[in-house]
Amino acid sequence: MLGTSGAIGLQRDSRMLGDEQSGATVPRMILGARLRRLREARNIARSEAGETIRGSRSKISRLEAGRTGFKLRDVEDLLTLYGVTEEGDRATLLALARRTNSLGWWQSYHDVVPSWLHVYLGLEQAAEVIRCYELQYIPGLLQTEEYARAVLRQGSEAGSRDQTERRVELRMRRCRVLQRATPPRLWAVIDEAALHRAVAGATAMRAQLTHLLEMSELPHVTLQVMPFAVGEHAALGGPVTLLRPPGDELPDVVFLEHPTGALFPDKPAEVERYRHIMNSVVVDAASAHASREMLHRIRAQL
């Protein structure tokens, strides 16, 4: 039973998810996690839960992982199976279920957003903390429009000029998350190689470096550079992003992007491994102050 947490939980969820910025991603993950805990508390197998909602074991797995929307009828049946009978508790979870099919603002870009990116966008727009290491490019949330356009033109899904412009528009809208009244805490480590790679030409790169310097002055943004001199380090394998969802119910989410898609490793040991990688990268990288000096130096050479 959820006990008195019903009404309190509903108030907390309303504060946490009361706008459109998160879309359905975070509500799905929260509801999935709560249903999983209720099922496990009753020692009910996923296969039995699947039969209850006229589905399968794999459907329960997807629901509990927050990878799909919820039907109210399914949630009602699962709550009954799990012994949740108190009206306040049921109302809390059913209200959350209604949020799991809401649309985020980025849904209007469905023509240029691959399916695997939707989950990430929801997490990015709702996250309390975003930590990332980038090897080849400037992190998306810190890109200028001209730099973003050059990067997106080269991507595997570049498409037509109109499609590229739509992707640029989407990326610039994503960047607004850092300008909100209550923005996420962004901690970005950029490999020095990305700072020397003038993908949009020297003039555009100079503007990009200026933008990084300006963004690094924001109180909620920490920017570090991984110098060539460091040599081998924990994240040489590629870019890593860790997102901390709002509230305290969900663990950090690991996002690993590659040219044709992305991975979301979610086993506790995997999440801990990537948390350790990011901690190591932060220690190995130049300090925020030294990184700003590097940015000034590299910009002066362009």
Image: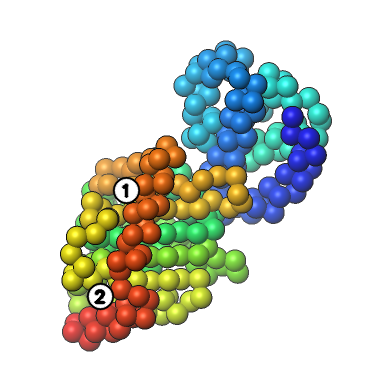
Query: Nearer the observer, disc 2 or disc 1?
Result: 1
Tell me the CA gap for discs 2 and 1.
Answer: 23 Å
Tell me the quarter of the picture where residue 140 sits: bottom left
Residue 126 pos. (x, y %): 54, 54
> Residue at coordinates 23% horizontally, 55% vertically from top-left?
236
State the residue lying farthest toward the bottom.
300
> Residue at coordinates 60% horizontally, 69% vertically from top-left?
181
Report the front residue among 21 and 39. 39
The reply, left or right, for residue 177 in relation to residue 238 is right
Tell me the quarter of the picture where residue 175 sits: bottom left
Query: The N terminus appears in which quarter of the rendering?
Result: top right
> Residue at coordinates 51% horizontally, 45% vertically from top-left?
251
User: Can residue 147 be spotted in the picture?
Assistant: no
Marking on residue 102: none
Marking on residue 205: 2
Residue 136 pos. (x, y %): 23, 61
**Amino acid type for the residue under numbered disc 1:** Glu
> Residue at coordinates 50% horizontally, 53% vertically from top-left?
244
- The residue wearing badge 1 is 257
Residue 156 pos. (x, y %): 23, 48
Density class for disc 2 (Cα within 10 Å; few <14, some 14-19, many ≥20) is: many
User: Can residue 181 be spotted in the picture?
Assistant: yes
Give SS at disc 2: helix
Report the front residue among 51 and 251. 251
Report the front residue among 41 and 6. 41
User: Is 138 rendered above or below residue 95?
Assistant: below
